[in-house]
Amino acid sequence: MADYQPLPFERPIQQLKSQLKELESREEQTPELQEEIRQLKLEITRLTREIFDNLDAWQTVQVARQTGRPQTPDYIELLFDEFVELHGDRAFGDDRAVLTGFAKLNGRKVMLVGQQKGRTIPERSECHYGCAHPEGYRKALSRMQMAAKFNLPIVCLIDTPGAYPGIGAEERGQAYNIAFNLREMSRIPTPITAVVIGEGGSGGALGIGIADHVAILQHAYYSVISPEGCAGILWKHVKHADKAARALRFTAPDLLRLGVIDEIIPEPLGGAHRSHRQMATRLKASLTESLKSLEGLSDQELLDHRYEKFRRMGEFEEGAVTIPIEE
């Protein structure tokens, strides 16, 4: 597990852990001391569960961005029996923000498409902090079309704050390539399952998110815009990102209620960054089950169900609705 810095709301937990460490370091371990240690461990577990079961939207964003959280390369190592990376988009370059390649899941061949942020400064610079360029989306779509040719199911791991917003990306057709992916993914005649493993920001996430089965980890988020971007538009300042997070309704329970996702994958106690292996085991079970549920469908049934799935989103009842915006 990668090192991580405790988040602000985790301070009460850290204080108890410091007390536990001090007690365990004492030379004389009397029965009374051992019982105190046992009770303190129970209290740490109880407090951790209470805090993480009641995270607000902004706290969820902080957990989703936690640097120690498992990323696509971690899941490649823990989930798949084999992985052969495929590079480049055959047009411009190899976008390192997007990883693609052949993989084996429980012995079954799949095509993996995943986004990666990197952890160290050099890694993050190479991966553009998880923000893909147009060549990244072309690369992803090319691999998906290859998967369809060889009748392989597709696994997409989503983890990005958004598509790269630079001038070069826009000049090379960023918006067009994302829109093109949306259309073409809706037509790919092979099972697609997508999981939001951290951040699911804007079109950058949706560009590989048109799937037959869409899941999200318990403390991840999936949104049309980042909280900071929303705050800049509505409140004219990024300091209101916490208000924007609450307004966007992008946490896992909200998304399930709105029909945007199909499944919430529980995380280990205290978040996925606490135990990469345990999180990978749960993710593997979800992927295996979702692919199994799709394998009996014909190509046309897959396409019809995928079409209906996304057409159902956005249902609403007409009426006067007042949305309060805090000053």
Image: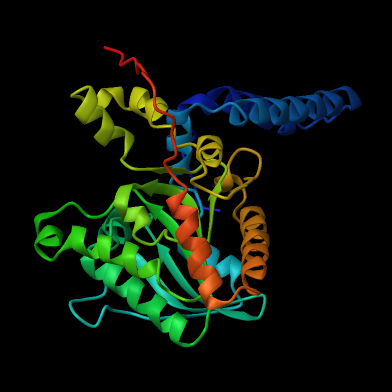
**Residue 71 visible here:** no
Residue in the image at 58% along x and 28% along y: 14
- Residue at the image point whose x is 57% and y is 50% from the top: 262
> Is residue 60 found left or right of 118 in the rendered image?
right
Which residue reaches farthest bottom?
150
Q: Quadrant of residue 175?
A: bottom left
User: How far across and down, in percent of the image, does residue 6 sit?
Assistant: 49, 34
Is residue 1 visible in this depiction of the protein? Answer: yes
Residue at 35%, 47% (x, y): give it: 201
The percent coordinates of residue 169 (x first, y second) are: 15, 60
When asked about the image quadrant of residue 52, the answer is top right
Residue extending furthest toward the top: 327
Q: Is residue 96 above or below residue 220?
A: below
- Kindly identify the residue that appears in the image at 53 percent across and 69 percent down: 302
* Along the line of sight, the residue nearer the viewer: 19 or 255: 255
Q: In this view, does 146 lie above or below 105?
A: below
Horizontal side of residue 290 vs 325, given as left or right: right
Q: Look at the picture and state if 129 lies above or below 65.
A: below
Q: Where is residue 145 in the image (x, y as percent from the top left)?
A: 39, 79
User: The C terminus is located in which quarter?
Assistant: top left
| Residue 85 location (% of width, % of height) | 42, 79
Foreground residue, 150 or 10? 150
Give whichever of 3, 219 is nearer the camera. Answer: 219
Number of numbered discs on residues? 0
Q: Is residue 275 above or below residue 105?
A: above
Residue extending furthest toward the front: 318
Q: How is the image coloured?
A: rainbow
